[in-house]
């Protein structure tokens, strides 16, 4: 994916950088990512679509609307391909999306909304949903294998509390893992139900933070798993992701923070918290109480 | 080197009226000294430069809307945003009747608001006037000038407050 600096995007659109920033505030488009140095980076596809729309537009608003429409064709294509059980076409739709957007935005703006659409249309207990969810799960895992090797001295353990790969939350959890991996973080996801030998695995990873993701597993199961983790690592910062109905109860009980529902927002939030704590004097991670251990585990 | 002002040919419409350029958001004429080839207004940066004949073009703070041949709103001036209590980003692609409706019950059908707008949006209609009111507002009426503008072809509806 080709990206443009503010000055390059402004030149392509024949406007000043200030105008481009004003459009971002008023229209929310083009929507830049941020570089490591917090500079704006615009995707070439978005800027080019806007340039074409401006040539035939009557206002900036209508040109933005037209450019957005042009970019949303990827979502329609992916929905059509998955509804027609055409895997090659689905892969092609994601390739097209990646030509215009980052991996993060392709997943959040094309893949996940398309799957939501299919879930609404066919129901979460239908074969078409299972077909689409399996494809999306495979795509996300494949993308994770292509992520660069870990570059940060940071490891995150994800307690996967989703039902299975057909759970709609599971795709968001896979996306969260992918985004953390792409940020150079070592990530390991383990199902909440697997507690035998957990200490050995956790000891090998030595995580800096725990994320409990998904809302299917019961609080007792989560607490049992968390107790085993704490026994191996000591207290670590804990966050909840996509654990909607249970979040407030667990947060109150355990002092865990709640991550935003969107995977990229959750990744950024978690890294900001963990990185911030690592930068504190003494370079120590401030511990937060973990989920309370279940009665039988404490006994 | 002394900077010379470039000569610009006078653009003339079909009826011999001078074509005037203005911003579709702030209504200001484009800055003559900026020859960037961009259609984006150099004053506010939030509108595209459009053209219309001098007798229809908005003057001063006159609110105006730009409407296409499908009667969808394409642009709302800053003054019209205030007058109609809307935002251009929310108004774009909505039907003009969501904002303005005819208010002259005695007008013959040829002067129906929507007919005038379609004629103007086709680029062939001559500037006309009619009376309109905001939708779901009674007792408030505006005289409206309607004529072609562009590019591309669209109808310009200027309200006289």
Image: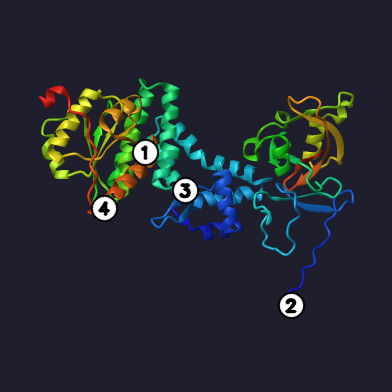
B29 horizontally vs A209: left or right: right
Local packing at callout 3 (Cα closer than 10 Å; few below 14, some 14-19, many 20+) is many
Gap between marks 1 and 4 measured at Cα? 19 Å
What is the chain identity of the residue bearing mark 2?
A: B
User: Does residue A98 appear to the left or right of A273 in the view shown?
Assistant: right
Q: Residue at x 53, y 48 (%)?
A: A30
Q: What residue sits right under mark 3 in the picture? A: A100
Which of the numbered marks, if any, corresponds to residue A263? 1
Chain label for disc 3: A
Q: Which chain carries label 4?
A: A
Marks 3 and 4, how far apart in space? 27 Å
Mark found first going from the N terminus, 3 or 1: 3
Q: Which chain carries label 1?
A: A
At numbered mark 2, what does the secondary structure look like: helix, strand or loop? loop
Tell me where residue B100 sits by quadrant: top right
Apparent side of residue A101 relative to residue A56 in the rendered image (left or right): left
């Amino acid at each position: 994916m080709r990206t443009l600096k503010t000055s390059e995007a402004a030149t392509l659109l024949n406007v000043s950088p200030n105008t481009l920033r004003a459009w971002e505030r008023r229209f929310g488009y083009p929507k830049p990512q941020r570089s490591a140095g917090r500079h704006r980076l615009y995707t070439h596809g978005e800027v080019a679509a806007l340039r074409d729309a401006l040539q035939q537009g009557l206002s900036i608003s209508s040109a933005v609307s037209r450019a957005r429409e042009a970019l949303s064709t990827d979502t329609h294509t992916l929905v059509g391909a998955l509804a027609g059980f055409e895997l090659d076409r689905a892969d092609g739709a994601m390739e097209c999306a990646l030509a215009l957007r980052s991996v993060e935005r392709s997943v959040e703006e094309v893949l996940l909304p398309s799957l939501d659409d299919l879930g609404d249309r066919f129901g979460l207990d239908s074969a078409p949903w299972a077909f689409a969810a399996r494809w999306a799960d495979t795509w996300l895992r494949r993308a994770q294998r292509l992520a660069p090797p870990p570059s940060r001295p940071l490891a995150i353990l994800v307690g996967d509390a989703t039902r299975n790969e057909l759970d709609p939350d599971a795709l968001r959890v896979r996306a969260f893992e992918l985004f953390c991996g792409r940020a150079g973080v070592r990530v390991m996801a383990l199902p909440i139900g697997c507690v035998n030998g957990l200490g050995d695995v956790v000891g090998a990873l030595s995580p800096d933070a725990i994320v409990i993701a998904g809302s299917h597993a019961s609080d007792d199961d989560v607490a049992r798993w968390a107790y085993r983790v704490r026994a191996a690592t000591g207290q670590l910062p804990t966050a909840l992701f996509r654990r909607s109905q249970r979040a407030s109860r667990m947060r109150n009980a355990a002092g865990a923070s709640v991550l935003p529902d969107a995977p990229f927002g959750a990744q950024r939030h978690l890294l900001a918290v963990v990185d911030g704590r690592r930068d504190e004097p003494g370079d120590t991670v401030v511990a937060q109480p973990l989920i309370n251990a279940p009665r039988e585990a404490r006994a | 080197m002394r900077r010379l002002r470039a000569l610009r040919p006078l653009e003339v419409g079909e009826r011999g009226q001078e074509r005037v350029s203005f911003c579709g958001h702030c209504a200001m004429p484009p800055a003559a000294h900026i020859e960037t080839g961009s259609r984006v207004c150099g004053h506010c940066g939030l509108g595209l430069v459009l053209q219309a004949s001098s007798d229809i073009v908005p003057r001063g703070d006159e609110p105006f809307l730009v409407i296409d041949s499908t009667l969808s709103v394409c642009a709302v001036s800053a003054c019209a945003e205030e007058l109609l209590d809307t935002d251009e980003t929310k108004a774009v692609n909505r039907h003009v009747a969501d904002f303005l409706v005819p208010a002259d019950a005695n007008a013959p059908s040829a002067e129906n608001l929507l007919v005038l707008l379609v004629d103007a949006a086709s680029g062939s209609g001559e500037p006309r006037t009619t009376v309109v009111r905001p939708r779901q507002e009674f007792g408030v009426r505006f005289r409206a000038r309607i004529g072609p503008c562009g590019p591309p072809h669209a109808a310009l509806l200027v309200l006289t407050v």
